[in-house]
Amino acid sequence: MCKDVEASDLDGFDIVVDATGSDAVGEMLKDIKTTRYVLINRVDQPDQCDFYFSSLLRYGPLKVAVSTDGSSPVAGQVVRDKIRRMLPLEIGDFLHTIAGERQKGIIDPEGSRNEIKRLLARVFLLGCGPGDPDLLTLQAYKCLHQVDVVLYDHLISPEILALVPQDTHRHYVGKEKGRYSYTQDEINALILEYVNQGLSVARLKSVDPYVFGRGAEELEYLLSAGVKVTLVPGISSATLQL
């Protein structure tokens, strides 16, 4: 059996969440606030709230809260879920380790800073297809727009490079017969250097470098260095018909 909300129902409470949607209850709460200290949250009435709820993510000791100040809890949830996909679960394990070291008196801010940057960095070994931007995969296109650095060589067409955002750093690492701007070892080291700075990197390769290509070289090196790598296959020229 339901009953109407009365002011006496709130006696002894300092925090009230009103989900009734009733204007009468809202007026009652407003009157209560004139006589005693109470914090009120009225659902879907952000202008009548003293506090807001956040969408919370937990990674061990790390808590990430997303709030829209009551304007749209659903939007906050969407942003929260986007952040969840971006942050690696290993952050929690790392923070537990750091907490244990701190209890032993071991404090290394610079080491912690470098390690957390590495955890947040990503490398995409990205197949760009035969050069026509219309043949670029949707995954490859998305990657181009979420990295900090793009490494490319002379086989990547100007049309593909035109898709790279203007504020993304571009680094040419072309290797042509008899003329190397970078050796493979230097390219490997360069990718790792960017990762150690906490930057996400896309290494652009023509066609599908994992079909009759040499796409595994950088993959093996980066995995051995403990770097998270995402392979993004491209359309192989071997599958195209004239």
Image (tube, rainbow, N blue to C red):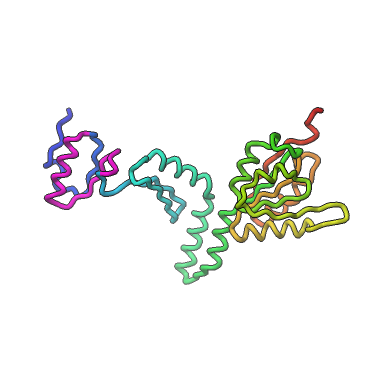
Residue at x-position 38% and y-position 47%: 67
Q: Is residue 113 left or right of residue 17?
A: right
> Farthest bottom residue?
105
Residue 1 lies in quadrant? top left
Residue at x-position 15% and y-position 31%: 3
Give residue 75's position: percent from left, percent from top: 41, 40
Q: Is residue 242 left or right of residue 87?
A: right
Residue 49 lies in quadrant? top left
| 197, 225: nearer the viewer | 197
Residues shaded magenta: 22-47
| 179, 185: nearer the viewer | 179
Q: Is residue 42 magenta?
A: yes
Residue 235 lies in quadrant? top right
| 2, 24: nearer the viewer | 24
Residue at x-position 13% and y-position 44%: 31
| 223, 125: nearer the viewer | 125
Give residue 76's position: percent from left, percent from top: 41, 43
> Farthest right residue?
178
Q: Is residue 207 left or right of residue 77?
A: right
Residue at x-position 42% and y-position 53%: 63
Quarter of the image that includes the C terminus: top right
Give residue 8's position: percent from left, percent from top: 11, 42
Give residue 42's position: percent from left, percent from top: 25, 41
